[in-house]
Image (cartoon, coloured by chain):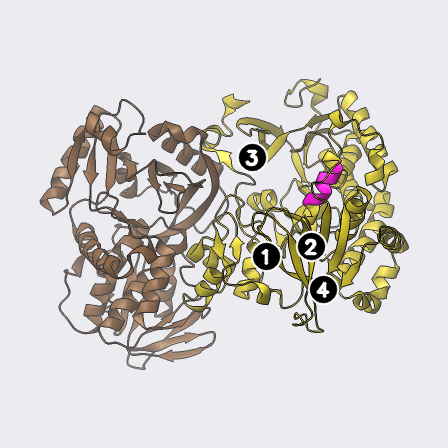
Chain colours: A yellow, B brown
Amino acid sequence: MTDPNDPNHAAVLPHLAVIGAGPAGLAATVAAASRGVRVTLLDSAAQEGGQFYRQPAAELRARRPQALHHEWRTWERLRNGLRTHVDAGAVRHLTDHHVWLVERGSEGFTVHALLGPEQEEPVEVRADAVLLATGGYEKVLPFPGWTLPGVVTAGGAQAMLKGALAVSGRTAVVAGTGPLLLPVATGLAAAGVEVAALVESADPKAFAGRTGALAAQPGKLAEGAGYAARLLRHRVKVLARHTVVEAHGTERLEAVTVAALDGDGRVRHGRERRIACDTLAVGHGMLPHTDLAGTLGCRLDGLAVYVDEEQRTDVPGVWAAGETTGIGGSALSLAEGHIAGRSAAARLRGTEPDPRAWAAAAKVRDRLRAFFAALDSVYAPPAHWTEQVTDDTVVCRCEEVTGGAVRQAVAELGAGDLRTVKLLTRAGMGWCQGRVCAPAVAGLAGCELTPSRRPFARPVPLGVLARAGEPESD
Amino acid sequence: MVGAACALYAGRAGLDVVLVDRGPVAGGTTGAGEGNLLVSDKEPGPELDLALLSGRLWAELAQEFGAAVEYEAKGGVVVASSSGGLAALERFAEGQRAAGVVAEPVAGDALYELEPHLAPGLPGAVHYPQDCQVMPALAAAHLIRASGARLLTGHTVTDVLRAPDGPVRGVRTDRGDIHAPAVVNATGTWGGELAALAGVPLPVLPRRGFVLVTEPLPRKVRHKVYAADYVADVASDSAALQTSPVVEGTAAGPILIGASRERVGFDRTFSLPAVRALAAGATRLFPFLEQVRALRSYLGFRPYMPDHLPAVGPDPRVPGLYHACGHEGAGIGLATGTGRLIAQALTGGTPDLDLTPFRPDRFAEEAA
């Protein structure tokens, strides 16, 4: 194996660090490595694939892992491409590397990582440029009972299915909003779980008004139709324009109450029904991971990293691709990763890239961005979801801050934005640094969800921090 | 914080107070502070006098707000790293005692009874029981609420209104004019900008500081513990990065680690060298911190004035304009005394302290 930090290696080819081995990072790695650039690919997981192509642990010896994935051929092509470049020494793939900081210096970048699962031992990788493909994470809004054991995130349920080939629980309800709920419901049903209901707060009629961007993606519509057929086959009851108002149970989840929503997004009282279940998979969409970009000083556009046509951020030498630049699924991530990898390779080799070379990918990218923008306006939590959050509902789980405490900070202490609520209540100050609760706190405070500054993308031991970036730590 | 304290004491002196801020409550340096109420780092002189007055007032307010503002009379422990350093520290403490500070020398063994997890082999320390802590954002919010002042957040002051013959008549904001016979400039690091709107110079400069916050832990650091070189850094005029570890546990569990100082303007870029130096200093003092994780770090801009003293009191150049800013890293601690002095000045009372050293126009004379 070659060492990309070794200056004697490979006639000092330019070196790109790609962070994240999901669809965007893999596409970028293969694109750049094919074009004369050394790549170090870092990811926190034990195998490549990210959340989308999450693979069963090797020791489970899954016979047909593709049963849980679509676009299996795309995945095989990417994986084989990665292996070819790794074998040829053009790519170094660092698994179990948890990146906590990317530092920009006068002579390039240093990627600071912790070696997983303990995350105590530091690793530093120097590179001429970095490509952030850090993906997204799930947004979950609180409701009474959401902290009960048995309530999991929709993405968490899917990760269990893909990674462990198993789920706990026999009867599940899948709830919230967003395109992720469909594969979660069908996946659970296929794994033998009785899916008692799929509770989606969006209104199916809302799709009708946005046919333009949606119809431009016949593949995506066919995908949706495929899910619909599978839901039917597994006899999953779909409750559109419904929401979960409460999860019940003493030791763990026993049932949920769901209610219909009126045209304004308010719960119709008297129309609640109780559904027995031991698992509730709930999700309200995705948010981009932007911590590394934020600390590098990259401009954010709303909650996502700003990129230009070549997927460059506004910080020289930093590219970004995939859901860190906006939520849009795997096909969009692949297109963005491909463009970013080609652009980075050309510019690192001192040439001006020709956008015509990736015209096909750019076309896919533009169409999918329009498609997901339309989708995003359909899949929205109920407009008045905060009315379900009682004063004793825990909103910030790390610091155990209740809905009542947030409301008090707003009403009595003059907080009107996320940061002030955090300062006055500690909501968002704990282990997850507000990644989970920020959307909920913003909703309760009646303010906009703004990106928080999180200098460290994950907690770092002070002993590691005290020596980070010192020359002898190589 | 200083504005909140001014509003509280002015309101309690019977004045009708409007509190204007372009951001939210505690949105400036207050929200980025550790909440130090220190006497230990101050040499005898006007700042120490203000700190002692402020400490007494904070103790009074603690009766009223105690738990809500997380007031804690935890005491400070200033640690020397060498025997030479200890001798210098003890001489410094002797001067402070003469000025009314309680400063108790602590020999090697007794030090580990005060702070059992300190690195072994330290020669000694000085214990300052008067050092305290509050949670600054909570303190500001609760003082404002108790002040009865009308709070206008999200209002940016765009001009200071003055009568043709000179005296102030109020302020103009982006959301309308506010008329008042007196305007108190409690804009901290941005105090120079507000003074400029009134047509007078006030040299307040930003001095950036980072704070590191760890995961929550059971109480292992009992006092506010810092190395003796902190005092030298506070008093320094250098623009370059200086760090001296200040380590303390909090009521909520995390350990806070300060304090870096550098004059880099209002640059909000994360600085690994600054934060790395904080971590290195803290782990030298408390080796157990090596394995403890930092969850986050934040930065703020201390309002620095060239002689390290704040501007407190009426501005003789503009009748009706009062300044209460430039407290550098001590604004939380000095807020109460400042608020009391401003209220006394506003109501024509006799100030508890001589305001001469804090005169806002003291720099203009030097420049002239």
Choose the circle earlier in sequence order: 4 or 3.
Answer: 3
Distance, label 1 to label 4, CA atoms, is 16 Å
| N-terminal label among 1 and 4 | 1
The question of residue A160 being in magenta is answered with yes
Q: Earlier in the sequence, mark 2 or mark 4?
A: 4
Question: What secondary structure is marked by label 4?
Answer: strand
Give the residue type that dot 2 points to: Ala
Q: On the image, which quarter does residue A213 sit in?
A: bottom right
Q: Which contiguous range is marked in magenta? A: A156-162
Amino acid, disc 4: His
Q: Which chain letter goes with mark 1?
A: A
Residue highlighted by disc 2: A276
Please tell me how crowded label 2 is: few (under 14), some (14-19), or many (20+) other residues with Cα within 10 Å: some
* B228 with respect to B156 (left or right): left
Badge 3 is on which residue? A106
Give left or right: position of B253 versus B113.
Answer: right
Mark 4 or 3: the one toward you: 4
Tell me the kind of residue under disc 1.
Pro
**Marks 2 and 4 belong to one chain:** yes
Front residue of A190/A457: it is: A190
- Overall secondary structure of the magenta section: helix
What secondary structure is found at the residue carrying circle 2? Answer: strand
Residue beneath the point at 32% across and 73% down: B148
Chain identifier of the residue bearing label 4 in the image: A
State whether residue B107 appears in this view. yes
**A458 left or right of B320 in image:** right
Marks 2 and 4: CB-CB under 8 Å? no
Disc 3 from disc 1: Cα separation: 44 Å
